[in-house]
Image (tube, rainbow, N blue to C red):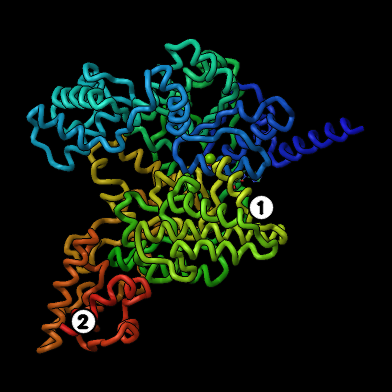
Amino acid sequence: MAQLDTEARVETRADAVLGALDDEQREAAQAVAGPVCILAGAGTGKTRTITHRIAYGVHTGVYVPEQVLAVTFTARAAGELRGRLAGLDVGGVQARTFHAAAMRQLRYFAPRVLGGPMPALVENKLRLVAAAASRSRLSTDRTSLRDLASEIEWAKTTLATPDDYPRRARDAGRDTPFEAAAVAAVYAGYESAKQRDGALDFEDLLLVTAYAIEEHADVARQVRGQYRHFVVDEYQDVNPLQQRLLDAWLGGRADLCVVGDPNQTIYSFTGADPDYLLGFADRYPDASVVKLERDYRSTPQVVGLANRLIGQAPRRKGLPELRLHGQRADGPEPTFTEYPDEPAEATAVAARCRALIDGGTPASEMAVLFRINAQSQVYESALADAGVPYVLKGGERFFERPEVREAVLLLRGAAAGGSDPGALVPTVRDVLASTGWVEHRPPAGGAARDRWQSLAALVDLAVDLVAENSTLDLAGFVAHLAERAGAQHAPTVQGVTLASIHAAKGLEWDVVFVVGLVDGVLPIAQSLSRPPAVDEERRLLYVAVTRAREQLMLSWSPARNPGAKRPRPRSRFLTGLAPDSGPTAPTARRPAKRPKVVLEGEAGELFERLRAWRSSAAQSASVPAYVVFTDATLQAIAETRPATLRELSGLPGIGARKLDLYGEDVLAAVTG
Ligand code: ATP
Ligand code: MG
């Protein structure tokens, strides 16, 4: 009887997993013993299919969870996989980036294959590259050093040695920062310097792990005995180095399921090669190849825009057309808006976020996506000024953050002293307060804010758990945290996501702002001379727009700083998508050039003093001056001479965050 019950339960769980898929997705999920290849566009349920396939394999007893290794490319995407697996009640499955998986294995095998503990990691190549370049008598600056480091990374991920480099770089049409032979010399110098230090870089991590498996029969036996079922998400972005590691793991076996979208290839510049995805069926002639076309993520309005955008790309020979068919109900049309300058664009986006939050959309359901990380600063300050919580990075390796470790230790200590059921949330708050954490006062900027948010996430988690189980006590909470840490399952930090498009791959939000759409940013300036690079930039925009479930807002601003002279044209990719001259934000109606501030007498002196203070404040924070305060705000301060923080806070352009950061400085400047 008991056994029948168990069998019935297994069957219903497995059935429930399959029931959540459409016919094509189900076909892929039921093919639990690979090789399987899913080639499909954005939002068609590729990631959903692989997580359900794993759950189906586990619930039917075909897979031992610990023997499944799911890999992907970014820490965020790995977090997303883990979150979805946890939601399907599947524990024990490894979902990691290639790097994290390699790191874990190498750390374990290092004594055996390297004869000692895990070597130090070169986190940043620049120092070693600079030394190698100067030994080669190259005169370099920061940019050319960075370019040299990128070339070395490209060479290593495409498995090119220094000797191979000149030929391979020529064949690939690389735009080399120096003559190819000189780059090769720096590459060789870098490698020997690194070897002398006994260190490994990130590429070595994968290479040495692959080598350990290839060359050590006992290591191979152990790794291949541990991992029997492999899944790769976002396989269009695999590079030859990662493929080599994957092949080492497989050791000729074919229990492999890959999923990807060639239209989302966004790392070819760094060596990724979509041919591994496109050639999968040739490599494994018995593979089940599944196509998915129904887009479950986005409204038909967003899907239509995505189709038009990718329709502008030159078609690759042999590539199936991956048109998306939107399945959801209609939603609002995507909007296209021009702002006069970046601060105005950021202020408007922040105001929109604020309004949406006030209207009930959770902040965690919104994202602001940009091409390069440097763009985030102006959005960070605009969101902070509008009182909108935001997160810069996902909840990755949450439990490894120092503040979280410290907090967990303190909570564990407190739990050892006994705990009250029914008082979990206030107890957690008290314990965190002992670290200086103040609930209602998120500090401004950078590391302090990240730290505050991590601890806030722990309180939120306690609140959520108490809502499910009102008798949970501190000891139970601490046990739950340990379990989550083991499963690497971070609580969601509540806030608008600020992310580069690269980091947003695979993720989705109800509301997405894609900002900074000017030529020179997207497509990025370095790509403009090479058509394949411009195509990759178009795919990046495709990735960005397909992140939106419902509302998609695209925007740009001709000027970077207020009053800049040379306007930047809007992104060429918008031609044919946006109206010819996009609607212009109301703020653009103000005169483009503000009259130069002329203040007389004492006010004039104070204004100049404030400007001098502003430029040093801007310099020490490495931000443009207007991010500290605009001229208009300085003018208002100079005219009203506030004597207290309260008076200061009444002036335009001074939000809580600015007050915190600069209030005292400004008052000091006013009193002279
Ligand atoms: P990307 O290419 O952007 O990584 P994807 O193909 O991996 O996209 P998913 O993230 O798996 O797509 O799915 C997109 C959204 O559609 C998710 O919210 C997912 O839960 C939902 N979805 C997918 N398939 C179905 C389905 N059969 N029924 C209901 N919802 C679905
Ligand atoms: Mg996906």
- Residue drawn 9% across the image and 32% down it: 138
Above or below residue 490? Residue 666 is below
Q: Residues within 10 Å of mark 1 (few under 14, many from 20)?
A: some
The residue to which callout 2 is attached is 635
Q: Which mark is residue 538?
A: none
Would residue 347 be found to the left or right of residue 248 on screen?
left
Percent from the top left, x then y, of residue 404? 48, 52
Q: Quadrant of the C terminus?
A: bottom left
The residue to which callout 1 is attached is 476
Percent from the top left, x then y, of residue 266? 39, 38
Mark 1 and mark 2 lie on one chain; the one further toward the N terminus is 1
Residue type pointed to by label 1: Gly
Q: Residue furthest front?
A: 417
Q: Secondary structure at mark 1?
A: helix
Above or below residue 329? Residue 259 is above
Percent from the top left, x then y, of residue 51? 62, 37
Would residue 574 be found to the left or right of residue 163 on screen?
right
